């Protein structure tokens, strides 16, 4: 689960950085290119630490009371079996 969380974090942070580069064209002749590139590892580090901290916080809560986090698997199975033609 942690691997999937980190994969999603890297994907989200990369898209956020790509959109940031799209609107940061005003920096082209003001900020050195190395500084603009240094933002990406910092963004990955902050997003990765945040997602790991969130998963580490929620995991014990889920283990203590899994019924507090219902997953609609039964509803998905019923919907899938009734929609087959």
Image (cartoon, rainbow, N blue to C red):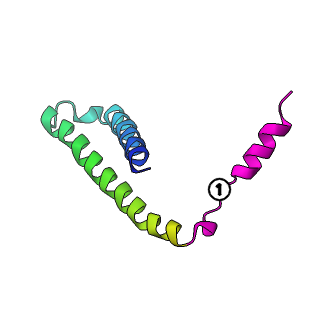
Classify mark 1: helix, strand or loop. loop
**Left or right of residue 77, residue 5 in this image:** left
Identity of the residue drawn at 21% across and 30% down: 28
Q: Report which quarter residue 78 is drawn in.
A: top right
Identity of the residue drawn at 30% across and 36% down: 24
Foreground residue among 1 and 44: 1
Residue sitting farthest toward the top: 85
Foreground residue among 35 and 44: 44
How packed is label 1: few (under 14 Cα within 10 Å), some, or many (20 or more)?
A: few
Identity of the residue drawn at 27% across and 34% down: 26
Q: Inspect the magenta stretch and tell me whether residue 75 lies in it.
A: yes
Q: Inspect the magenta stretch and tell me whether residue 35 lies in it.
A: no
Q: Residue 14: horizontal and vertical position, in percent?
A: 35, 37
Q: Is residue 32 visible?
A: no
Q: Residue 68: horizontal and vertical position, in percent?
A: 62, 69
Q: Residue 66: horizontal and vertical position, in percent?
A: 58, 66
Is 1 placed above or below 30 here? Answer: below
Position of the C terminus, as image quadrant, is: top right
Is 79 placed above or below 67 here? Answer: above
**Left or right of residue 4, residue 25 in this image:** left
How many marks are shown on the rendered structure?
1
Q: Residue 44: horizontal and vertical position, in percent?
A: 29, 46
Q: Is residue 18 visible?
A: yes
Identity of the residue drawn at 39% across and 41% down: 7
Main SS category, magenta section: helix
Residue sitting farthest toward the bottom: 64
Q: Tell me where the magenta segment starts and ends, as one range.
A: 65-85
- In this figure, which residue is indicated by the disc labeled 1? 71
Is 2 placed above or below 59 here? Answer: above
């Amino acid at each position: 689960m942690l691997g999937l969380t980190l994969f999603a974090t890297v994907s989200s942070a990369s898209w956020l950085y790509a959109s940031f580069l799209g609107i940061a064209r005003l920096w082209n002749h003001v900020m050195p290119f190395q500084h603009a590139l240094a933002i990406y590892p910092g963004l990955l580090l902050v997003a990765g630490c945040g997602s790991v901290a969130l998963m580490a916080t929620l995991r014990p809560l889920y283990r203590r009371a899994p019924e507090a986090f219902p997953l609609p698997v039964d509803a998905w199975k019923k919907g899938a079996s009734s929609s087959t033609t």
